[in-house]
Image: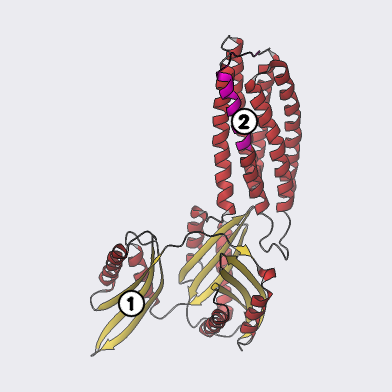
Amino acid sequence: MATDTRAQRVAAVSLGVTGVLVLLKFGVWVATGSLVVLSQALDSLLDVVALALLYIAIRIAIKPADREHHYGHGKAEHLAAFTQTLLIAVVVVGVVVEAALRLGEDPSVSAPWYAPALLAGSIVIDGTRAAIMGRTARATDSDALRAGALNIAGDVGTASLALVSLLLIRGGFEEADAIGALIIAAVVAVVAVRIGKRSVDVLMDRAPEARMDAIEAAAAAAPGVQEARRVRVRRSGNKLFADVTVAAGRTASLERAHDISDSVERAIQEIEPNADVVVHVEPISETGELGERVQASAGRVEGVHEVHNVLVHAFDEKGERKLHVTLHAKVLSGLSVREAHDLSDRVEAAIAEELGVGVRVDTHIEPLEQTAIAHDVTGDRADVVAAVKEAAQRETSVLDCHEVIVTETGAELAIMAHVRGRADLPLSEIHQASTRVENALHATYPEIASIVIHFEPG
């Protein structure tokens, strides 16, 4: 909470300083008619709006999760940062239009000593503010403050260009006013793109690749984990949400599975202290080692983006051990049937080379899905919530189902359920119960695309 208060204080002080600079810059513009000074005044006025949004966003973002916002309010910061981008774009367009018009006219602009003096002072003040906000953003992991610091750092550059333009005007090169304004607009546009891209990435739930790799490695290395099967990561404010599926031994009890889940959470939180982690533990098959070899060899084939649903069946044929492998591989959606079939042949050849002759491989090729935005519809789908709880509580191994979250992507639903079961049950029995629950829900609601059931010992 102390870091949140610090972020609010820095944003409030910066807002007050910017307000003073706006008044001074508009006063100098009225006195000189300089377009570069006007662009600086408009940029600072924009900063007032942006910093006000930033201050409000930080106050909203620190609110805890509630019934309507299960993942908290952290994205308010990113929404504020994106709004800054839109406001910057409006100012850039206005300055470019005015500068283009002035280039075709006889310039009439003055640059008395106090105009460059004001910009020199603004450079010093903005440089100090950007450094303070940057340090605070790193300390509080605030994207809104980070965007504000980047914006003000851009102001230092644009003010420097404006100062050079005014000095050239004082030297008799009056066209420097419009030319300088165009250069400033270009610099501000670059800053806006940088701020906007980061904000859009978070608002679209784009997974931070570097963090995802580190989280997957931490989950795979956690005590008791034999395989990290799926990792999904998204960011909201200064919090990271991770949904992790790992595999453990078939004979592990529910209590042991919960201990493994805790070890995965601790491992991830060691590298991401603010991470909110949900872990789902599945039993690994007796042919799990072969399954890992299949997944690794198929994943090395160029053009394969993801391998899943790997099954290895072992059987005897006239006293000789045979293997039958089936798997799903995701590839780019633009491939033709012929190209997909050729890729399937390469996958099957790679697996046969890994496991040896006498193995049969059947590959299902499917298109790589594009990222989609999910919306929390738990409050609107009370029927689904009730159906999940009813299906879970029909299982004798389940003690209760105490939390259900329903999200919607297009016409498909995704379910996250937290249930408690008897602590002494083997994981395989719990997994079978989970499968029966999933099958019952899919039969009742065909629109359900995925179900994650998180078990805890009762």
Is 53 placed above or below 348 here? Answer: above
Please provide percent x and percent y for residue 10.
Answer: 72, 40
Please say whether residue 258 is visible from this viewpoint.
Answer: yes
Total marks in image: 2
Residue underneath mark 2: 94
Q: Which mark is residue 325?
A: 1
Point 55% across, 51% down: residue: 201
Is 211 placed above or below 11 here? Answer: below
- Give the extent of the magenta segment: 88-110
Dividing the picture into quadrants, the one containing residue 457 is bottom right
Is 203 placed above or below 323 here? Answer: above
Could you tell me which secondary element the residue under label 2 belongs to?
A: helix
- Identify the amino acid type marked 2: Gly
Please provide percent x and percent y for residue 278.
Answer: 59, 67
Dividing the picture into quadrants, the one containing residue 35 is top right
Point 55% across, 81% down: residue: 434
Could you tell me which secondary element the residue under label 1 belongs to?
A: strand
- Identify the amino acid type marked 1: Val
Please say whether residue 161 is visible from this viewpoint.
Answer: no
Where does the C terminus fall, quadrant-wise?
bottom right
Q: Is residue 245 left or right of residue 294?
A: right
